[in-house]
Image: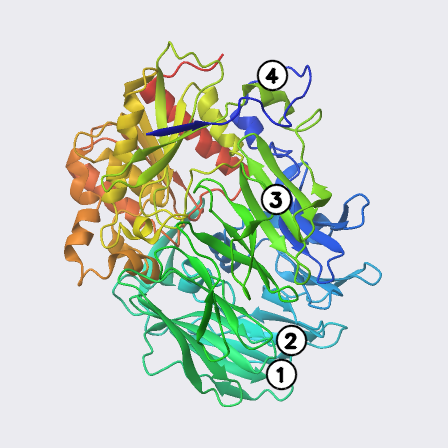
């Protein structure tokens, strides 16, 4: 076992004689944001002279405006005030709420924006309508004013047009003004143009259905046919009643959409269909243009996700050829690492070595070089500097719990060079040319701080320094901040499992405390990282709990072997690994082994249920939020990736079902939470569990949220209610002594 503690000195957190205050739920979920003025959605203007970003209002952490800072200096300034543009009493449509839910958008106002490649305009969608900010003069012009939402809006690469989707058809407006033009007709819910289907948005991280060519003469766009997808009727229960929603939801083993791809000539309106192959039961995963706009690259994924083909399409005829193929006995993960080069070649990432690494290919699809190598994974390509032949990427090279920015030559590969220091977690946005980047750094004692850096990683200027000094929202609570301890335990196969632990303010190792395991546990997300903690987590510590987290096998930032160990057996090895972590936790003299709780949301909710129903479960209480309880109720792309189909893997599905294990659940050990309008993990996952528990006369508690979707947190009030309910339940069950 390995244990690593952060330095005891809180870097940059000194606030002089400020009196420490106890953090309350009411303060956590009110403004200003306790984590300080953070820059979100950071981007650099194409000419590299301006940094733009989203920033929350001080009086409302859920409302964001568009801000900018000049590279040469000067105070940051607001470009667009969201409140000034939002129509009075404007409500988002249900379709837009669902779309934002799938994108993880948790704010309102300016939530996205788009530069043109010339750097003349910024397109800003605000609550369903479109506005265009002109750099020449700094004016904001309204482009649309309709009752229907305009979604997935973009400025064309050269700034000549603004495109958007309305009611499943693609439209165009000249950027300088003029009438809109419909590029497609006949789009509807069942036959949509330029619209990513549910699976693409929710599971494939593809949020668009159309792609501009570099010279803006053509647009590649999808056409999605949903007629074969099952209609799942679900009750959408709101505060004033319920409606039955007939949702096209592709559950495991059932039909998916049929996706086609076309290339449209903007001037003439002529379309050419791209040949995606004879098999229609495939996924349209990614679409990219070559640098010269003469070739369209398409990533086609097989239904079982064990094969990924990169196709090159002739835009004049639609004919395609396979450039390369990735295969795996488990699954092939999708990424955005395909980067075309001016010479016709491209960069690509692959896990064929057992770790994710970068490769260079020539224009024929032949591998020319392996750019990175070693027993560590690349995270993602962040930029390419073709002038110097450099690829810029993030990677967990030192440890899975830290992320840094690196650069390597793709022309003459060698040892990568780091551009950022170690110690925490970096999120970056690299300029389209020159290698400069906007970097956001955070660690457990440093809230996210954003600066502009040159191509060698030297700080040019702060965008949001966010130093916790006098006047910072977190300053009154600094002296109560407990830094985490990190360590590892061994999984059954010998691999290291990283964990983190935080103790309450005033912690006394001579006393005993209740502990809570907060987890996710599912593939695609790791929680044990050196990042600034959500201030809401501090509430557990203030209440007198020790907070423990462990990343089990299947979570990212690790080797292929670590990630794929769970193949075809969800809910088995993850449970085994979490129990190994709890076994370690119980050896600590200050942890009361009889007072351990567990909580998580979504996959974490599922894991909470699986741990509560494990033989000889060590947990005295659990709060499970929005849990999938039966994988046959979940969607195709996610579930089949890890489990196959129920027909092919009946034993795996049987072992993963929660209701088959409920005899192991002790009475009064569970609180179940769920949004009653959830269109992702549909509410019947919880109603089936409720019915099964009631049939067995096993007592439990519930907290349901009318009208809320999967995250059940559309407003600060909802998040506050969830936090209070969770803390109240654990307090009643585990009897902590509040921190002094």
> Which residue is denoted by mark 2 in the rendering?
172
Dot placed on the residue nearer the N-terminal end, 1 or 4: 4
- Residue position marked by numbered label 4 in the rendering: 20
Q: Nearer the viewer, mark 3 or mark 2?
A: 3
- The span from disc 1 to disc 4 (Cα, nearest Å) is 62 Å
In this rendering, which labeled residue sits more in front, label 4 or label 2? 4
- The span from disc 3 to disc 1 (Cα, nearest Å) is 38 Å
* Mark 4 → mark 2, Cα distance in angstroms: 56 Å
Under tag 3, what secondary structure?
strand
* In-front residue for pair 238/349: 349
Q: Earlier in the sequence, mark 3 or mark 1?
A: 1
Tag 3: Cα neighbours inside 10 Å, few (<14), some, or many (≥20)? Answer: many
**Residue 663 or residue 395, whichever sits in front:** 395
- Residue denoted by label 1: 266
Seen as rendered, the residue at the extreme top is 510
- Tag 1 near tag 2, CB within 8 Å: yes
Does residue 33 appear to the left or right of 122 in the view shown?
Answer: left
Of pointers 1 and 2, the one earlier in the residue sequence: 2
Q: Earlier in the sequence, mark 4 or mark 3?
A: 4
Indicate the secondary structure of the residue bearing disc 4.
loop
Query: Does 483 appear above or below 628?
Result: above
**Image quarter hosting the N terminus:** top left
Residue at screen point 42% across, 37% down: 528
**Gap in angstroms between the C-alphas marked 4 and 3:** 27 Å
């Amino acid at each position: 076992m390995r244990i690593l503690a952060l330095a005891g000195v809180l870097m940059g957190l000194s606030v002089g004689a400020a009196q420490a205050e106890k953090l309350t739920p009411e303060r956590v979920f009110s403004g200003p944001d306790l984590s300080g003025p953070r820059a979100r959605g950071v981007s650099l203007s194409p000419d590299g002279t301006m940094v733009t970003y989203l920033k929350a209002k001080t009086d409302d952490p859920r409302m964001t405006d568009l801000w900018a800072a000049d590279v040469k200096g000067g105070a940051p300034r607001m470009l667009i005030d969201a409140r000034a543009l939002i129509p009075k009493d404007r409500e988002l449509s249900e379709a837009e709420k669902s779309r934002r839910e799938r994108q993880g958008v948790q704010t309102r106002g300016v939530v996205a924006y788009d530069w043109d490649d010339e750097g003349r305009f910024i397109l800003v969608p605000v609550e369903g309508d479109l506005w265009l900010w002109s750099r020449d003069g700094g004016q904001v012009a309204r482009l649309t004013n309709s009752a229907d939402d305009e979604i997935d809006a973009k400025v064309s690469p050269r700034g000549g047009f603004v495109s958007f989707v309305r009611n499943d058809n693609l439209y165009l407006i000249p950027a300088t003004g003029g009438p809109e033009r419909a590029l497609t007709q006949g789009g509807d819910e069942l036959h949509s143009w330029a619209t990513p289907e549910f699976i693409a948005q929710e599971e494939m991280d593809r949020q668009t259905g159309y792609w501009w060519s570099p010279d803006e003469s053509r647009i590649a766009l999808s056409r999605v046919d949903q007629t074969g997808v099952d209609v799942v009727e679900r009750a959408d229960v709101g505060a004033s009643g319920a409606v039955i929603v007939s949702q096209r939801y592709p559950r495991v083993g059932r039909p998916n959409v049929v996706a086609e791809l076309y290339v449209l000539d903007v001037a003439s309106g002529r379309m050419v269909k791209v040949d995606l192959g004879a098999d229609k039961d495939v996924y349209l995963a990614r679409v990219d243009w070559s640098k010269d706009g003469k070739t369209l690259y398409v990533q086609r994924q097989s239904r079982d996700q064990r094969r990924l083909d990169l196709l090159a399409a002739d835009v004049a005829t639609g004919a395609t050829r396979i450039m390369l193929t990735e295969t795996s006995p488990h699954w092939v993960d999708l990424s955005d690492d395909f980067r075309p080069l001016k010479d016709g070649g491209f960069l690509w990432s692959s896990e064929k070595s057992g770790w994710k690494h970068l490769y260079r290919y020539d224009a024929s699809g032949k591998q020319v070089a392996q750019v990175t190598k070693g027993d560590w994974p690349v995270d993602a390509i962040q930029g390419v500097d073709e002038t110097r032949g450099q690829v810029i990427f993030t990677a967990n090279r030192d440890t899975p719990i830290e992320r840094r920015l690196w650069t390597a030559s793709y022309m003459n590969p060698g040892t990568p060079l780091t551009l950022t220091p170690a110690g925490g977690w970096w999120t970056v946005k690299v300029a389209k040319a020159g290698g400069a980047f906007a970097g956001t750094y955070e660690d457990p004692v440093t809230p996210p701080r954003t600066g502009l850096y040159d191509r060698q990683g030297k700080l040019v200027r702060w965008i949001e320094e966010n130093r916790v000094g006098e006047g910072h929202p977190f300053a009154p609570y600094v002296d109560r901040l407990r830094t985490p301890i990190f360590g590892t335990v061994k999984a059954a196969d010998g691999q290291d499992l990283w964990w983190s632990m935080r103790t309450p303010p005033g912690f006394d190792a001579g006393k005993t405390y209740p502990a809570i395991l907060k987890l996710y546990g599912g593939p695609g997300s790791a929680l044990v990282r050196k990042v600034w903690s959500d201030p809401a987590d501090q509430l557990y510590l203030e209440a007198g709990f020790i907070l423990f987290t462990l990343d089990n096998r299947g979570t990212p930032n690790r080797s292929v072997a670590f990630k794929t160990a769970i193949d075809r057996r969800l809910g088995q090895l993850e449970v085994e690994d979490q129990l190994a972590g709890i076994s370690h936790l119980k050896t600590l003299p200050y942890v009361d082994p009889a007072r351990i709780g567990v909580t998580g949301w979504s996959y974490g909710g599922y894991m909470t249920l699986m741990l509560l129903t494990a033989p000889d479960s060590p947990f005295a209480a659990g709060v499970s939020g929005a849990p999938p309880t039966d994988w046959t109720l979940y969607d195709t792309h996610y579930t089949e990736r890890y489990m196959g189909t129920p027909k092919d893997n009946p034993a795996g599905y049987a072992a993963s079902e929660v209701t088959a294990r409920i005899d192991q659940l002790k009475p009064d050990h569970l609180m179940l939470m769920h949004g009653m309008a959830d269109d992702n993990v549909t509410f019947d996952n919880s109603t089936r569990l409720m019915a099964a528990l009631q049939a067995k006369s096993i007592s439990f508690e519930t907290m349901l949220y009318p009208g809320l979707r999967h995250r059940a947190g559309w407003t600060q009030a909802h998040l506050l209610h969830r936090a209070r309910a969770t803390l109240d339940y654990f307090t009643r069950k585990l009897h902590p002594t509040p921190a002094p």
